[in-house]
Amino acid sequence: MTLTILAHASEASGLANEDIAGTLGRFAWIVDGASGVSARTLEEGATDAAWLAGAVDGILRERIARGDALDLPPLLKHLETTLCDRFHGAATGPLATESDGPSACLALVEAGPSHNGRFALRAAVIADVAVIVPGEPRWTDERLKPFEADTLDVLSRSDRVPLGFPEPVLAQIRQNRLNLNKPGGYHAVHPRLPWCAAVLHFEAEVPAGAPVVLATDGILRLVDLFGDMSEADLVAGIAAGDTPALLARLRDLERADPEGRRYLRVKPHDDATVLAFTVDEG
């Protein structure tokens, strides 16, 4: 069994790319980092979110490379505990609240043995990234959506500023963060707050050679925000090798509405990452 890569692209929206994606062995993953809300800094990484995305990627690679028997639950628990240790070793400065610090969306996929030409596929998803599997509803985590809606409501009533976010929007983001990894709140990978038990798990069988797509919400703007194409068309374009053209189309749409007045959004531009593969014998 092997993962045959169809597309692997990650494009920053600014100076720092806070997304990352990777594969090793029978595993594939995608990470979308989000910056914290305090002045605490990290010794490495362009931003705290970029540091976190890189740390998640590195920890997964190190653990999977050991080559012993491993499946998703212990791998996720190892990631949670190791990430906490590394954050405390790298961070300097005060933390305003327990939920402060960077967080990240994560989708981690494991391919299993074949049966009658179909492969078992298992995924763990937390926060706003997606796994698109043939014949399945989108595998994602919708628990963040009500909090995003609150932020967009505040944004719709706020004056735009040339750089950064209006103060009322920042205040709403800080308020949202108080619900991070709490009962009734939303959930994400975090270096201080436990998150592993809140991961959503999915499972299906996929035919050999069928495209599986991991995507951050940046590239999914083509479907979910701009309505420029269907999810099926997006997957078909990625599988056909058209990812560069899709990313160019995304940037054109973002630039055509730079203040987000037609398509309301907090960030005018967003990092966009996609990883697509097939599972094949071999």
Image: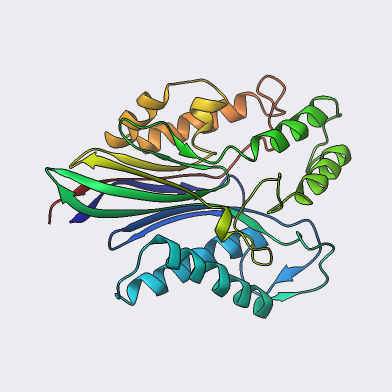
Rendered image quadrant of residue 259:
top right
Q: Residue at x 56, y 58 (%)?
A: 197
Q: Is residue 61 left or right of residue 174?
A: left
> Residue 222: percent from the left, percent from the top?
50, 28
Task: Work out which quarter of the rendered image holds the N terminus and state it.
Answer: bottom left
Locate the C terminus by quadrant. bottom left
Q: Position of residue 79 (x, y in %)?
A: 51, 68
Instruction: Judge whether 40 appears above or below 164 on screen.
Output: below
Residue 241 visible in the snapshot = no
Q: Position of residue 45 (x, y in %)?
A: 61, 67
Q: Can residue 195 be seen in the rendering of this structure?
A: yes
Residue 137 found in image quarter: top left
Residue at 36% over, 41% down: 213
The colour scheme used here is rainbow
Between residues 199 and 259, which one lies in front from this camera angle?
A: 199
Check the image and name the residue furthest to the bottom: 89
Left or right placement of residue 240 versus residue 171 in this view: left
| Left or right relative to 225: residue 267 | right
Counting from the top left corner in percent of width and height, residue 14 is at: 61, 48
Looking at the rendered structure, the number of numbered marks drawn on it comes to 0
Name the residue at 82% across, 41% down: 172
Report the front residue among 86 and 185.
185
The correct choice, above or below, for 273 with respect to 86 in the image is: above
